Image: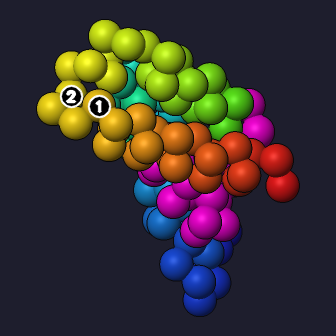
Amino acid sequence: MGAWGVEPFENDTAAEFADKLRAVTFTGLRSRDPLVVRAAAEAMLLLDAAGLHVGKDFFQDAKYRLQEMIEDERFVSSWNEPRAILASLRRQLKRVAARGYR
């Protein structure tokens, strides 16, 4: 028995694809590479915006990891424009925090 709705993720094939996207995203949140963590946090926002379930725990994890990056002076100072990366991280943290508490 398959699902065949008209929306992008209302069919079995797309649902399987969405499950893979979620798995990759959640793995990325646990990466040691801060750039992967940032990309995963942004992907999580996209999944949520598409109506795909993203649990509050994952938003909490992303929020924690982004805050770690903001506080990591070595990471921030490694950028050519430390102020710009801090501003970007803070904007991303704000988006993640806002979505995680709906």
Question: Are the two marked residues, 2 and 1, in contact with CB atoms closer than 8 angstroms?
Answer: yes
Distance between mark 2 and mark 1 Cα atoms: 5 Å
Q: Residue furthest right?
A: 102
Identify the residue at horizontal 52%, vertical 41% (top origin): 90
Q: Amino acid at mark 2?
A: Trp
Q: Position of residue 17 (x, y in %)?
A: 44, 56
Identify the residue at horizontal 31%, vertical 10% (top origin): 74
Give left or right: position of 22 versus 2.
left
96 or 7: nearer the eye?
Answer: 96
Identify the residue at horizontal 41%, vertical 35% (top origin): 86
Q: Position of residue 59 (x, y in %)?
A: 67, 38
Magenta segment: 41-58
- Residue denoted by label 2: 79
Q: Quadrant of residue 88?
A: top left
Give left or right: position of 99 versus 77.
right
Q: Main secondary structure of the magenta part?
A: helix
Q: Quadrant of residue 67?
A: top right
Q: Quadrant of the C terminus?
A: bottom right
Mark number displayed over residue 82: 1
Q: Amino acid at mark 1?
A: Pro
